[in-house]
Image (cartoon, rainbow, N blue to C red):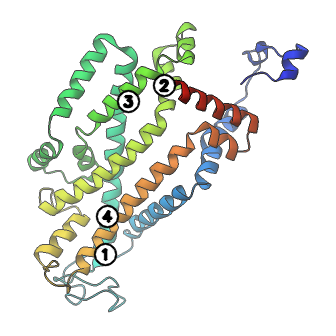
Amino acid sequence: MKPTESESVGGEFSFETTSSDVEVTWGERLRDFYEEFIYKPGVVAWNDRRTKIGGAILTVYVVMAIASLFYRQPTSNQAARGLHPFTIWSAPLGSTASGEDVLAMVIHATPSMLIMIATGGVFATGVAVVIGTVAGYKGGLIDRGLTSFSDVMMSIPGLPLVMVLAVVFEPTNPAIIGVLITVNYWAGLARAIRSQVLTLRENSYVEASRTMGASTPRILFKDIIPNLMPYVLVNFANAARYVVFTSVGLYYLGILPTSVANWGLQLNNAYKQAGALVGTGALYQLVIPMLAIMGIALALILLSQGLDRVFNPRVRTRLAGGSESTASETGDETTASNEVMT
């Protein structure tokens, strides 16, 4: 932050006032952590309509996952066969050709899907951040080795590789399935992050950290990775959507084991057993799982767009009650830098 005019003119301002002789207590550190990582992001997220809607939709899925602990398991002949939605309250969304409760099938597929999304997204973005930042910052032989490894992984067709691995290992754990689906999804993201880091490492504050003798891990975690967070979060949502669509497709094709409940299995049963595409009598068995898939994809898209504002310093300063002049300066600097870049 720049010194104010009164501080500069009066001679009272000194850079030594921020030196380490001022002891910071644990309470102050916890308060700073709360304001920086919980309060300010929360205020920005709450003031964004997309974040609210996306969070509300995702909350519905979390509630469905919790409800699976109490709602009955889908089994054959638990209701009259081929019931349409809203016919009886014991099966409000109808039943399949074998008498399974459609609502129970949707609810019990939710926990495994959320686990796949979390593990697949974390694995893909985690590996991409590690390889991309190290390659971009270190350069030289390390950069060439990691970049070549990423190129090799990118050259392997993703879906056929996942299909082969799924057939060979027949995974039944949703966490392992999530990792399996994104086994080479991270490669393209790692290359993109490397390009971002090549620009960031030339910034003055990174150069200042190097001059002061800061270690490489400290520079990466303090100066580089925080500036990548908006990009990483957006790509986390994209990776999560990739896991949703790919897992549904693999279950629909019968490649993944049927022991794990999934909306893709519902689509498969609706098409092959109920003939949902022939006439409209069983179309609801196809539409209901599709709505579940579309809903969670929409939630991830809205959250990624809303979280992008959370890491915008100008928006955070304005909405969190910070100095308007600081926000204005930040915005002016951002505008100026953009003009220079263009």
Gap in angstroms between the C-alphas marked 3 and 1: 41 Å
Answer with mark 3 or mark 1, whichever residue precedes in sequence.
1
- Between marks 3 and 4 in the image, the one whose residue lies nearer the viewer: 3
Determine the CA span between mark 3 and mark 4. 29 Å
Q: Amino acid at mark 2?
A: Ile
Q: Are marks 3 and 2 in contact (CB under 8 Å)?
A: no
Using the image, tell me which numbered label, if any, was put on residue 293.
4
Residue 139 located left or right of residue 177? right
Callout 2 secondary element: helix
- The answer to whether residue 69 is seen in the rendering is yes
Read off the residue under disc 2. Answer: 224
Residue at image location 27% in from the left, 21% down from the top: 146
Q: Is residue 10 above or below residue 253?
A: above
Q: Residues within 10 Å of mark 1 (few under 14, many from 20)?
A: many
- First in residue order: circle 3 vs circle 4: 3
Q: Earlier in the sequence, mark 1 or mark 2?
A: 1
- Amino acid at circle 3: Ile
Tell me how far mark 1 sits from mark 2, CA to CA: 46 Å
Left or right, 327 with respect to 88, comes to: right
Give the x, y percent position of residue 181: 23, 46
- The CA distance from mark 4 to mark 1 is 16 Å
Looking at the rendered structure, which numbered label has been put on residue 193?
Answer: 3
Q: Which mark is residue 104?
A: 1
